[in-house]
Image: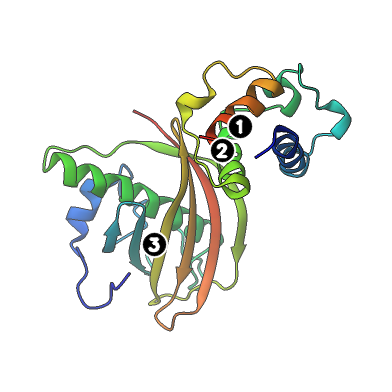
Amino acid sequence: MNHSSNPISTDIDFIKKLIPQKDPFVMVDKLLCFESEQLVSGLTVSADNILTSPEGYFTEAGLIEHMAQSIALHRGYNTYKEVGEDSKPKTGFIGAIKHATIHRLPAVGTALITTVTIVAEVMNVVLVSAEVKDETDTILAASEMKIVVMD
Amino acid sequence: METSVIIEKVNAFLIEEFEVEASEIAVEANLQETLDLDSLDYVDLVVAIEASFGVKLIGDDFVGIETFQDFYTLIEKKVNK
């Protein structure tokens, strides 16, 4: 997916309309690329993010939440494309996390680039793989998550 | 694909993925109870079946599946379709 030159949206107000999470718990700020079973999102780590440590690093919890919200963004944007401005983001929750690996905690100012891929979907459970990289294409974290989607 | 081959492959990934003893798997045994499946686990079954047989199951395919025999029959139908 080529996402570097032409992002879909960097408008944080638009992004917020696509996900159920609210401030101060919004952990995605860019929608870079979308396909039916894949999405690339972004987040620039800020010092005032509630999941940034006092030492200036985005925490493990922040990375996990960022991956989960990237999945929510996929569903939200998909609904937006189908329904338009009247779409409302569906809520969901992390049912299980498999194979989560945190390689490095990103410092404040790092631009995260995260790819989420839908592996399988059965009933209201979606199995998704997620990979977080920084601007240098270094893998920071990866996981597989089962997301339970609520109607 | 022959039934015996399907059963062998299914049992192999069930034993590995769901950490069930081979001796607990019997054609008439209840699949959900034996594997202690919750709703999150079915997606793992779908992924394992796709990886092993190249066929994709959907949620509706599991309606009426109670025993291991039901499950083998479902996969056999999908594989030999």
> In terms of secondary structure, where does tag 2 sit?
helix
Q: Which residue is mark 3?
A: A49
Tell me the kind of residue under disc 2: Val
The answer to whether the residue labelled 1 contacts the one labelled 3, judged by CB atoms less than 8 Å apart, is: no
Q: Are marks 2 and 3 on the same chain?
A: no
Give left or right: position of A7 versus A95: left
> Disc 2 versus disc 3: distance between alpha carbons?
50 Å
- Which one is closest to the eye, mark 1 or mark 3? 1
Q: Are marks 2 and 1 on the same chain?
A: yes
- Which one is closest to the eye, mark 2 or mark 3? 2
Residue B75's quadrant in the figure?
top right
Pointer 1 local density, CA inside 10 Å: few below 14, some 14–19, many at least 20:
some
The answer to whether the residue labelled 2 contacts the one labelled 3, judged by CB atoms less than 8 Å apart, is: no
> Disc 2 versus disc 1: distance between alpha carbons?
5 Å
Q: Residue at x 33, y 63 (%)?
A: A41
Quadrant for the C terminus of chain A, please.
top left
Pointer 2 local density, CA inside 10 Å: few below 14, some 14–19, many at least 20:
some
> In terms of secondary structure, where does tag 1 sit?
helix
Q: Residue at x 42, y 58 (%)?
A: A116
Q: Give the camera-side residue of B9 and A6.
A: B9
Identify the chain of the residue marked 3, using the numbered disc in the image.
Answer: A
Task: Residue B79: give its label.
Answer: 2
Q: Which residue is mark 1?
A: B76
Q: Is residue A127 above or below residue B62?
A: below
Look at the image and tell me whether residue B74 can be seen: yes
Residue B77's quadrant in the figure?
top right
